[in-house]
Amino acid sequence: MSYLLNGREQRILEDAIAYGKRHFEPYAAQWESEGRFPSETYTRLGADGYLGMYIDKTLGGQSMSFLESALIYEGLSRSSFSMTLAIECHNNMSYEMSIFDTSDEVKGLLPGMVGGDELLAFGLTEPQAGSDPNSMSSYATPVEGGYLLNGLKTWVTNGCEATQFDVTVKLGGADERQMVTFLIDMFTEGLEIVSDTKTMGGNLLSKAVIRMTDCFVPASRLVSRNGYKDAIFSVLIARIFTPAMAIGLCEEAIESTAEYLGERIQFGRPLLSNQTIQWELGELQAKVEAGRQLVYHTAAMMDTGVMPKREAAMSKLFCGDLAMEVTTACCQLMGAEGYRTGSKIERLFREAKMASIIDGTSEIQKLLLGADLVKRYVGREY
Ligand SMILES: Cc1cc2nc3c(=O)[nH]c(=O)nc-3n(C[C@H](O)[C@H](O)[C@H](O)COP(=O)(O)OP(=O)(O)OC[C@H]3O[C@@H](n4cnc5c(N)ncnc54)[C@H](O)[C@@H]3O)c2cc1C
């Protein structure tokens, strides 16, 4: 395994940075203040090669590796973590539709997923089931020709704009153990968007509450009979890519801060010429580089066919927390400017918090790493 990016990988990263700077950066603050998902920007992403990259070429994708895809997320996230999260969420769901044994009807939607006509959302979390998806109570009842779904899903990223919903529920009743996953069309009767949850950052993203009331879903839309395992697989993929996005955000925060401090004169000299400030930024840079290597290593492992469960947990934990550490330090280093509503660092600070919550919180990553240790050194699970 090479620890250096090759020419193609380097170009992919640079192109993604340039793309974000051109199409996201000029509007990111406005999207954030208006709390509006930029559909016009989303629709062009397909033609520009940023949708369905890791879907196989035979199904309309680009057969990109996980490492190459992580580089894209790192690059785009430099300009908007939130927009990149919307794309990542869609891409991960689309990828699943391409690798699962789905019906011709579902496979037939792939060109729209890769082209940008479809936008996918992921519904796992419920009011009583966050870190512990097993405690969900939404369920599907088998009926003639399909299933009737009932229940509530919360925090559905892209939920207000999505055309298709990847939803995991219990099979048979709320107290059952088996979970199944469906891909539900937005126009399905009984599927209702109840509200959009407002958050401290990432306001361009919708985080919808959706209700299913005797929502009939045909059997052709059942995409997994092993819903828990497959939902965990989606989360694993997200734990490869979300840290890459966190690294992009950290890099941008450090660069913006250094630029500002290089120009800001206090006591007759640029603030950046103070050694204590240089040390702090130097230390942060070292941590970001360490996180980046963890991201690349995890993605490269996935490319070899090994499930990097432990590495993904470490990467998610380290990079998620680092995003907060870096942006907190950068806000402080920029003084009042860092605290000003509308300043770039203020937006990055608010977005950074998402990185340690989504796709399993930092505490859950620590639990996973701890459980792995117990299994290895005690020999059984507790
Ligand atoms: C911006 C955003 C987007 C999201 N998008 C989606 C989406 O698209 N689809 C989706 O299904 N969900 C989504 N989520 C939900 C997300 O996955 C959950 O928020 C996350 O899994 C944590 O669940 P919770 O918020 O219910 O926290 P809880 O499970 O209620 O946990 C609360 C706190 O307790 C800690 N904790 C929990 N269990 C333990 C334990 N055993 N030991 C120690 N500490 C523990 C947690 O780390 C956390 O700090 C999104 C959330 C956000 C904020």
Image (cartoon, rainbow, N blue to C red):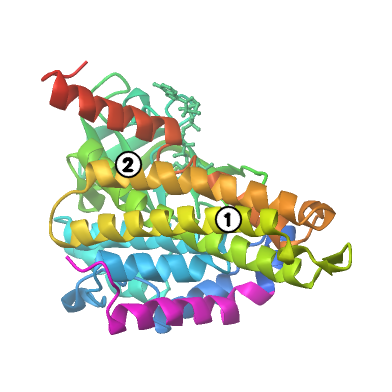
Q: Classify 10 Å Cα crowding around label 2: few (below 14), some (14-19), many (20 and above).
A: many
- The quadrant in which residue 314 appears is top left
Q: Classify 10 Å Cα crowding around label 1: few (below 14), some (14-19), many (20 and above).
A: many
Q: Which residue lies furthest to the top in this view?
A: 382
Residues drawn in magenta: 1-26
For badge 1, the amino acid type reads: Leu
Please tell me whether residue 18 belongs to the stretch shown in magenta.
Answer: yes
Distance Cα–Cα, label 2 vs label 1:
24 Å
Q: Which of 76 and 150 is in front in this view?
A: 76
* Residue mark closest to the camera, 2 vs 1: 2
For badge 2, the amino acid type reads: Ala
Q: Nearer the viewer, residue 81 or 182?
A: 81
**Tag on residue 313?**
2
Q: Which residue lies furthest to the right in this view?
A: 267
- The quadrant in which residue 203 appears is bottom right
Name the secondary structure under disc 2.
helix
Give the residue drawn at x 82%, y 55%. Answer: 340
Q: Name the residue under label 1.
A: 205
